[in-house]
Amino acid sequence: MAFMLGYCSNSPKRCHHAYSLEVLDRIDACCPDCGLALIPVQNLGRQLRIDIKVLQIIFLVLSIILLLLVYIYY
């Protein structure tokens, strides 16, 4: 038996599981409340770390530019 990890594909206004973004572990790949199909969970761990690093670098560069502009104009 293969379990499927996923999110409910229904509208958040119509299903509690879709509203809460709860990860469901189901054999039939359907939401237990509304019966719609689950959207598969992807492994976002690596991508999330890359995104955070990029945001940190952008923030650092913007901070340095801001400090340089303040130093130049004063």
Image (tube, rainbow, N blue to C red):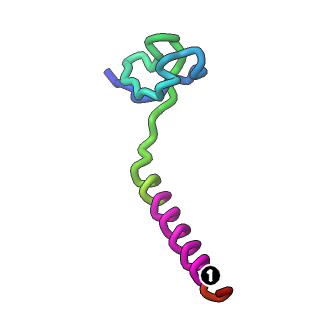
On whether residue 55 falls in the magenta region, the answer is yes
Q: Quadrant of residue 3?
A: top left
- The residue that appears at 55% across and 79% down in the rendered structure is 64
Secondary structure at badge 1 equals helix
5 relative to 73 in the view: left or right: left
Picture layout, residue 70 above or below residue 34:
below
Q: Which residue is mark 1?
A: 70
Q: Residue furthest left?
A: 1
Residue nearest the observer in this picture, 3 or 17: 17
- The residue that appears at 45% across and 20% down in the rendered structure is 29
Magenta stretch: give its range. 51-70
- The residue that appears at 52% across and 62% down in the rendered structure is 55
Picture layout, residue 24 above or below residue 69:
above
Q: Residue furthest front?
A: 74
- The residue that appears at 57% across and 80% down in the rendered structure is 67
10 relative to 44 in the view: left or right: right
Residue 44, x across and y down, in percent: 44, 47
Residue 25, x across and y down, in percent: 36, 24
42 relative to 61 in the view: left or right: left
Residue 31, x across and y down, in percent: 47, 16
Mark 1 crowdedness (10 Å alpha carbons): few <14, some 14-19, many ≥20:
few
On whether residue 57 falls in the magenta region, the answer is yes
Q: Residue furthest right?
A: 73
Residue 20, x across and y down, in percent: 47, 25
What is the count of numbered marks?
1
Residue nearest the observer in this picture, 46 or 69: 69
Q: Amino acid at mark 1?
A: Val
Q: Where the C terminus falls, by quadrant?
A: bottom right
Residue nearest the observer in this picture, 28 or 16: 16
Q: Main secondary structure of the magenta part?
A: helix
Q: Where the N terminus falls, by quadrant?
A: top left
